[in-house]
Image (cartoon, rainbow, N blue to C red):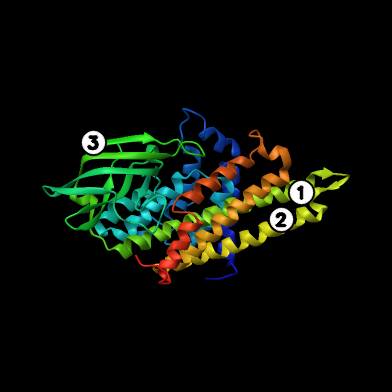
Amino acid sequence: MKLVPSQEELDLRGMLHDLLDSACPTTLVRSLREPGADRFPAELWKSLTAAGVLGLPFAEAYGGMDGRLDDVATYLLEAGRSLAPSVVVNTVSLGIAIDRLGDDALRSRVLPGICAGELRGTIALADPGDAHDVRPRLTAERDGDGWRVSGRIDHVCDVDLADRIFVTAAADGHVHGMLLVPDATGVEVAPLDVMGGPGQFRVVLDRVRIDAEDATGPLAVDDLRRVSHTLSSMRCVELVGVAEEAMRRAVDHARERHQFGRPIGSFQAAQHLIADMHIGVQAARLSALAAVAACGRGELAVRESAVARMHATTAAKRATLDAHQLHGGMGYVLETDLHLWSERARVLSSLDGTADTAAAWLAEEAGLVQV
């Protein structure tokens, strides 16, 4: 992992910063949360597709940008800062799962649509509260040359916006990946009432038909965990972007808000608070980018992913809470925007597991616990 970004990486982040500033203002974020609103950000999607974001980590043969996972991380820092809708990263996550777990035929059928912005998707690969737990929640039985899949999975993101969901199912003593159509016969989808507004769903399957071409061969646990920890590390980078923006807003407010005839940022207590926020955010940033770099090299990266999640969830919690404190009473008024970052931080900190959950991965990796 490089500690100093290259000029190319700086240029990419600058371009994405400007694009999201223009195409993803807080007015858009608020409008997508309104009851009954169309949650798909059509204009933003077009802009990000044109910029190549959806194809960043995929080969040129599929219409991608032939980039690295580090390039996706550059987008995620800006996505967290701007609270970009999660359908973008969930679609890229679907592509990463297909790219790493599927065969050439499945990649050729799915990845070009993702890169072109013509196919949206999401993924339910692991326990939503523990990225290390990749035991399938679904079961499958043979049906001719295909499968019949049944079971229930909770907290699946953006099902209402997805054309495909990548799930896993236990069958014949193995685990297989399945590409599911959300509105297929036998699929029931129900929204869950969670913090941060709509976006998470329960999916119940009753003998849903999956064609052979939409299923992978048997998958190894380590391969599933390799993808799951990659997606968890990516979410940590987004969480760092959220924390960075909360800190920036706190700093700006401390400069502008005057009390007793001077900016509140001139008081030592406020300076100490901001310094602690900065230290936590920078540690989270380095650990999250290190985890993404390890995953990009094809490593299992359990240790790196665990450290990233522990730092990112802690830093985001501190940054958002301290930002509210520095804003005083106005920081708790919904007419201001600060709560949007707090809620996104809470959601991202819960998905994949908390800091305590990640500490258990670390203990298992170090051989301190028996599994």
The residue that appears at 76% across and 48% down in the rendered structure is: 254
Q: Is residue 231 left or right of residue 101?
A: right
Kind of residue indicated by mark 1? Ala
Q: Secondary structure at mark 1?
A: helix
* Image quarter (top left, top right, bottom left or bottom right) of the C terminus: bottom left
Q: Quadrant of residue 180?
A: top left
Q: Position of residue 370 (x, y in %)?
A: 36, 67
Q: Are marks 1 and 2 in contact (CB under 8 Å)?
A: yes
* Numbered label tally: 3
| Numbered circle sitting on residue 186 | 3
Residue sitting at x 34%, y 41%: 163
Classify mark 2: helix, strand or loop.
helix
- Three-letter residue code for mark 2: Ile
Q: Label 3 crowding class (10 Å Cα cut-off): few <14, some 14-19, many 20+?
A: some
Left/right of residue 125 with respect to residue 7 in the rendered view: left
How many other residues sit within 10 Å of disc 2, few (<14), some (14-19) or many (≥20)? many
The answer to the question of whether label 1 and label 3 lie on touching residues, with beta carbons closer than 8 A, is no
Residue to which mark 1 is pinned: 254
Spot occupied by residue 279 in the image (x, y as percentages of width and height):
66, 62
274 with respect to 339 (left or right) = right
Q: Quadrant of residue 260?
A: top right
Q: Secondary structure at mark 3?
A: loop
